[in-house]
Image: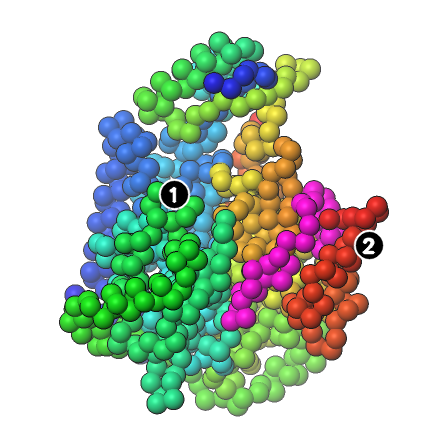
Amino acid sequence: MAAFKNPQILLASDLRDGEVMFLGASGWERDHRRARVALDAAAAAELEKIGHAEYASNHVVDVYLTDVEIEPDGVPTPLHYREKMRIKGPSVRRDLGKQATGA
Amino acid sequence: MSVHDLSAAARPNAPTTTYRYDEFDADFVRERVAEFREQVRRRLEGSLTEDEFRPFRLMNGLYLQLHAYMLRVAIPYGTLTARQMRCLADIADRWDRGYGHFTTRQNLQYNWPKLIDTPDILDALADVEMHAIQTSGNCIRNVTADHFAGVAADEIEDPRATAEFLRQWSSLHPEFSFLPRKFKIAVTGATHDRAAILAHDIGLRILKNDAGDIGYQVMVGGGLGRSPFIGKIIRDFLPRADLLAYLEAIMRVYNRYGRRDNKYKARIKILVHEKGIEAIRDAVEKEFASMDRSVFSHDPEEFTRIAAYFAPPPYESLPAVSATLRAARNDNPALDNFVAVNVSPHREPGYAIVTVSLKPIGGIPGDATSAQMRTLADASERFGFGELRVSHEQNIILPHVKQDDLPALWRILDAAGLATANAGLISDIISCPGLDYCSLATARSIPIAQEISKRFSDMSRQRRIGKLGVKISGCINACGHHHIGAIGILGLEKKGQESYQITLGGDPTFSAAIGEIVGPGVGAEQVPDVIEHLVDFYLAEREEKETFIDTWRRVGHARFKDALRREGEDGAYI
Ligand code: SF4
């Protein structure tokens, strides 16, 4: 297992509509601001375990952890530009995706 | 197996040159939709796992992308009727977000369908004889063809009859459902290659031999992606009667020797590259000579039957040059430019081929709104026998417009934001969806296209620069054909940032070439500057009538690279 370097959140896609979701305190959230943040390796492993179970019970697909930084207001923001894109929607269509609904 | 409605051919203004599915096709497609509906149901209720379901989903053109699912709809050889275009618009409104993206494989992608809606979308497509079969997976993919097929002034024969013949042969062939990798075929019947056939696993060029017989020059082992190769001639002249048998021999050799152990080495181009074209030719000819060819004995009749569907529409006899158009061009410079740049010669006197650019300045290459799709469908009915084409350059073609009608058509296109007069110019950029949508992407490509387009927004400057193909891919898979762009741009990740590698000298035509890298990658914000410097250098160096690629070939890699180096501070833009 890779060494734990940064806080992490768990992403997945909703099986029904493919929308990006984040594991929150009590289930899947569509807004990354409500994502549960793992601050150490044990917490990240716990997120992954839940993710695997959710995948196995056919609620979500494409489940993985991604590194984040915690903004001063407490919001976790992905470090990688790919996931930065996923929390918003296409950068060339600001009227579509999560960004269009104020997420 | 075939029952065709030939009556359509007799009706004026009905689409006459589009193959109509026979009942066999229609039943097959409906069955596949019903099967997929059941598979989706079982997936949603949990009795199919994702691993079990994924192959079914992909067989029906449904991918999971960054923000949502994506459905890729097949548009065989890029030909559409007005009715089909309207249906695509209706689907965009009803189940997607009001637009679609036309791709470099002459297909259409919806970026936001829900899994639960997909069977309904596929049923709606089946209503207009469309589907999403062969748009994914390790099969023979949707066969592509010259988008000017049947109308080009430089054409020997309409390549769509061949493309359709191959579609029927490949779509149901049990031996070809599980190939080592995907397999792409393109056909042209003209003396200029507009279908990039040398960048395909198999490229077919229709030729007439000295005896006046029509046959094919067969190219094999072309392809882009991680390891780009230009196709090599495997047969100089293949009589038409042998087409399927010979292609089957190629497929068998590929199936037998193609590598299944390594996905990156599994394409036929790698086999041709590793074994050499002579060895592959020997193996194919041996297979061809030994195979039972009696099963192909009905091919010529079948070909003739299919070719009848591509009979020309009922053209009027018209003077070769339209006085109405000439007068309108004199009065309207915008129309004049549009005709000069986006209109191509038609084989029929008094008619023209119109390229409708889906590349407005600063727009998203290949995207069309549902309203634009309807405008195009209406325009094709009013002015062009109800037929449209999708080009691999991600534009729409109206293939049979009377020159007299061009002013009226232009007004309609202009009002719909569809009259950008840039076909083939620097802002007519091919761009894959890249990281704005695609889960495989390593960088964005659309914003790069938009910035270049804005940088060159002055249309008179674009016309001065002349034909110049800029092609952008968001990853090494090269869906944006960057290897064969005179200027190619590949988006990669470098140290956690998007980085763009520039290649020069790519060529998609019969003089095909793979572009050469001119230096290390640059950041997104630098790309328009780099392109501008390259263009300025070309303009300074070009000799009379030279295109960018001509100057590149004459002047050479080193000087283009030098030009960039000198332009930057301490030695470099690149
Ligand atoms: S080239 Fe890469 S990023 Fe672009 S569409 Fe193809 S797979 Fe996606």
| Callout 1: CB less than 8 Å from ligand 1 | no
Depth check: give the residue in front, B137 or B549.
B549
Disc 2 marks a residue whose amino acid type is Arg
Quadrant in the picture for residue B277 = bottom left
- Can the viewer see residue A70 in this picture? yes
Depth check: give the residue in front, B536 or B2.
B536
- Residue B63 pos. (x, y %): 40, 41
Taking the spot 63% from the left edge, 37% from the top edge, the residue there is B494
- Residue B301 pos. (x, y %): 21, 77
Characterize the local packing of mark 2: few (<14), some (14-19) or many (20 or more) Cα atoms within 10 angstroms. Answer: few
Label 1: which secondary element: loop
Label 2: which secondary element: helix
Characterize the local packing of mark 1: few (<14), some (14-19) or many (20 or more) Cα atoms within 10 angstroms. Answer: few
Taking the spot 61% from the left edge, 87% from the top edge, the residue there is B323
Look at the image and say whether residue B393 sits in the magenta stretch.
no
Quadrant in the picture for residue A74 = top right
| Tag 2–tag 1 contact (CB < 8 Å) | no
Which circle marks residue B262 in the picture? Answer: 1
Q: Classify A86 as above or below B154.
A: above
Write down the region rendered in magenta.
Answer: B504-533
Which circle marks residue B566 in the picture? Answer: 2
